[in-house]
Image (cartoon, rainbow, N blue to C red):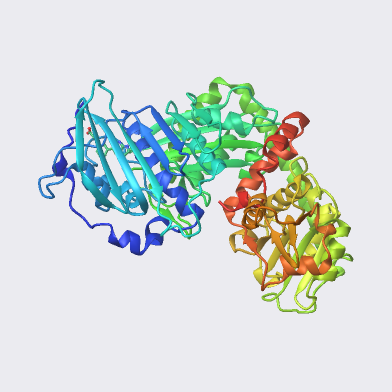
């Protein structure tokens, strides 16, 4: 082992005051997302220890008091005294901004970056208290901090064991996180599972001690992203048995790719990660991968005489049809771009991915001719289907030009012609549509009732989608064109597109489906923030002449708890929007003065798309299981990550 960390390597930077003054600068928001970033920050440090080869178990616990504990079996934060600060390295790491990152050296791979990677000191600054325990040098070292300030010195006691590692417990500060400090189980479990997939061999244990019976889950994947792809394809029928996997390192950049084509899938689902961060907006790693796939399979197709000399190449989309894949790169100095910093910008990565994957994929295909052939067969089918779809679209376009696309009959339009003030509510069924039509302000609110399940997009192709009546009404009502053509925001007839469905499983199903449609076919609408989710109440609580609308079971229980012990009250549960009086719907859900709406972000839609594949899969059994176990959770709060 060459690493020799001395405290002197820490450079003295700034204290923590700026973090408490402007938390948003460090963690993005002080809402739920920022709150959860605190956990990710500590976990990232432990992951870095794992990537450096010193840690293989990370335990995350939500404690009964709402605090979080992260324990790893790494080397432990150094505890020796820093020559210039005169304080321990541990205290320095916890109280000095960016100090943790200054332990670069030869300790291995420092991967945190981009979204997080701000340092544990930020967690310390934004916590009511932090307690750190380090096992190192046969001693147990502990220190406590409150709002970033050390409470007493570092305490060191002899340890009878020789274990090493770090434990960080913290309670987020309610003075900072004014919206509350409640951690969401599924948000954390989702991320920890993802990290376990991305870092093969690292065991993640997640325990929630808040319920009476603690709930524990273990995520441990020796196959890493191969198993991730396997998991994503679990309800689909594979085109080839073994997942295609290539990995390697070029110019200090680690590249890993896992690919699986499925027979019964028609879109492509490629997830990109850079330094363990999901790059929703893509970037150079995905560009490199797409380019090499297109080139490799076109070359193969010509070599195998599947396309003739005078025939055109297959498009990238043809080749990726039915493909599920993960690319994970680890870049020493990542550049993240875009508004949400979720696009990898390092230009060198494109070529490195292209050449590394190209070499290894060609080698793989040489030894696995039948796999290559069946992928090509599928791509050629996709090519033919796309041709048919193009003809179908031409037909639609010609028709709509001739008829100047009349608005759908069941659209109750608003009177305003100014898209900036106009809203359209997409509601499920005629009964809810009726309430909404009567309840709305017709000046700026339009209603479009959609019948039942609009259609099964996963199982069909573009041509069928555009022929579907409900989709056609949706597209014409919104004033939109066709996928693949330039999105022209000036054509959009409403700047708020509000999905308003019942708060039950069917409602969430339809919401998922609509979000998937927008995500796949009109992504600009999501990107530009035009899509919203209405939040109708679930209950009406009446007591005497007062009434309250409650938007969750918890809110209802909280309200009831405020009543005196023997209070008389009645609860009305709204089973669907159709059950609400039009004016109730207006007051609670549609009136801009009083309503709550959630703007859909790209991650929400991406999540919906993932769920959609499960919900719409051909096999009924896993789908039922999914709805039974997750139906209750797939509520509106899930969209508020
Ligand atoms: C600085 C230097 C070393 C390890 C760490 C920090 C470290 C930080 C955290 C935070 C959570 N878990 C952690 N584990 C380690 C290297 C120590 C050495 O060279 O022995």
* Nearer to me, 42 or 454: 42
Is residue 13 shown left or right of residue 60?
A: left
Task: Give the number of marks.
Answer: 0
Point 44% across, 35% down: residue: 60
Quadrant of the rendered image containing residue 170? top left
Quadrant location, the N terminus? top left
Q: Is residue 405 visible?
A: no
Residue 562 vertical placement versus 251 (above, below): below
Quadrant of the rendered image containing residue 370? top right
Is residue 157 shown left or right of residue 166?
A: left
x, y percentage for residue 102?
A: 23, 46
* Nearer to me, 417 or 67: 67
x, y percentage for residue 530?
A: 64, 64
Quadrant of the rendered image containing residue 499? bottom right
| Ligand 1 sits in quadrant | top left
Task: Point out the residue furthest to the left here.
Answer: 83
Is residue 408 shown left or right of residue 126?
A: right
* Nearer to me, 344 or 494: 494
Point 80% across, 62% down: residue: 397
* Nearer to me, 94 or 231: 94
Q: Is residue 539 visible?
A: yes
x, y percentage for residue 559?
A: 64, 57
x, y percentage for residue 380?
A: 70, 37
């Amino acid at each position: 082992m060459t690493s020799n960390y001395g405290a002197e390597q820490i450079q003295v930077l700034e204290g923590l005051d700026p973090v408490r003054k402007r938390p948003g600068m460090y963690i993005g928001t002080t809402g739920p997302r920022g709150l959860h970033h605190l956990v990710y920050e500590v976990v990232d440090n432990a992951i870095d220890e794992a990537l450096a080869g010193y840690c293989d178990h990370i335990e995350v616990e939500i404690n009964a008091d709402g605090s979080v504990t992260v324990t790893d079996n790494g080397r432990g934060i150094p505890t020796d005294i820093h020559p210039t600060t005169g304080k321990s390295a541990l205290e320095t790491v916890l109280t000095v901004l960016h100090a943790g990152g200054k332990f670069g050296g030869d300790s291995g791979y420092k991967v945190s970056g981009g979204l997080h990677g701000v340092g544990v000191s930020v967690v310390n600054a934004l916590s009511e208290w932090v307690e750190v325990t380090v096992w190192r040098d046969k001693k147990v070292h502990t220190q406590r901090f409150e709002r970033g300030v050390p409470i007493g010195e570092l305490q060191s006691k002899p340890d009878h064991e020789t274990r090493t590692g770090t434990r960080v417990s913290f309670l987020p500060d309610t003075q900072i996180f004014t919206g509350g400090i409640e951690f969401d189980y599924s948000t954390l479990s989702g991320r920890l599972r993802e990290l376990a997939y991305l870092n093969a061999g690292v065991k993640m244990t997640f325990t929630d001690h808040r319920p009476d019976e603690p709930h524990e889950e273990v995520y441990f994947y020796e196959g890493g992203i191969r198993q991730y792809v396997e998991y994503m394809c679990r309800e689909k029928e594979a085109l080839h048995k073994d997942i295609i996997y290539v990995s390697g390192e070029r110019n200090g950049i680690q590249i890993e790719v896992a690919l699986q084509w499925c027979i019964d899938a028609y879109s492509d689902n490629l997830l990109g990660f850079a330094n363990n961060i999901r790059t929703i907006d893509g970037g150079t790693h995905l560009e490199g991968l797409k380019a090499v796939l297109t080139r490799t399979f076109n070359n193969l197709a010509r070599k195998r005489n599947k396309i003739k000399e005078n025939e055109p190449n297959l498009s990238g989309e043809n080749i990726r049809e039915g493909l599920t894949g993960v690319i994970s790169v680890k870049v020493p100095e990542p550049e993240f771009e875009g508004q949400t910093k979720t696009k990898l910008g390092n230009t060198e990565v494109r070529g490195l991915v292209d050449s590394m994957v190209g070499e290894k994929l060609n080698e793989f295909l040489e030894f696995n001719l039948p796999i290559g052939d069946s992928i090509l067969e599928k791509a050629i089918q996709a090519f033919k289907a796309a041709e048919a779809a193009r003809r179908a679209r031409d037909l639609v376009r010609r028709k709509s030009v001739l008829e100047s696309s009349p608005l759908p009959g069941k659209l109750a339009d608003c009177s305003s012609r100014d898209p900036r003030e106009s809203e359209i509510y997409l509601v499920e069924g005629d009964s809810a549509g009726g309430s909404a039509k009567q309840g709305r302000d017709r000046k700026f609110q339009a209603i479009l009732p959609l019948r039942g399940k609009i259609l099964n997009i996963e199982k069909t192709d573009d041509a069928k989608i555009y022929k579907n009546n409900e989709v056609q009404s949706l597209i014409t009502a919104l004033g939109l064109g066709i996928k693949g053509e330039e999105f022209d925001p000036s054509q959009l007839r409403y700047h708020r597109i509000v999905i308003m469905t019942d708060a039950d499983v069917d409602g969430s199903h339809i919401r998922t489906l609509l979000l998937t449609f927008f995500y796949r076919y009109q992504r600009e609408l999501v990107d530009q923030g035009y899509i919203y989710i209405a939040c109708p109440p679930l209950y009406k609580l009446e007591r005497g002449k007062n009434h309250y609308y409650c938007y969750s079971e918890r809110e209802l229980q909280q309200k009831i708890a405020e009543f005196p012990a023997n209070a008389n009250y009645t609860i009305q549960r709204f089973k669907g929007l159709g059950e609400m009086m039009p004016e109730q719907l207006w007051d609670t859900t549609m009136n801009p003065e009083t309503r709550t709406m959630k703007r859909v972000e790209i991650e929400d839609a991406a999540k919906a798309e993932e769920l959609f594949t499960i919900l719409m899969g051909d096999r009924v059994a896993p789908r039922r299981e999914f709805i039974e176990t997750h139906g209750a959770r797939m509520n509106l709060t899930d969209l508020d990550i």
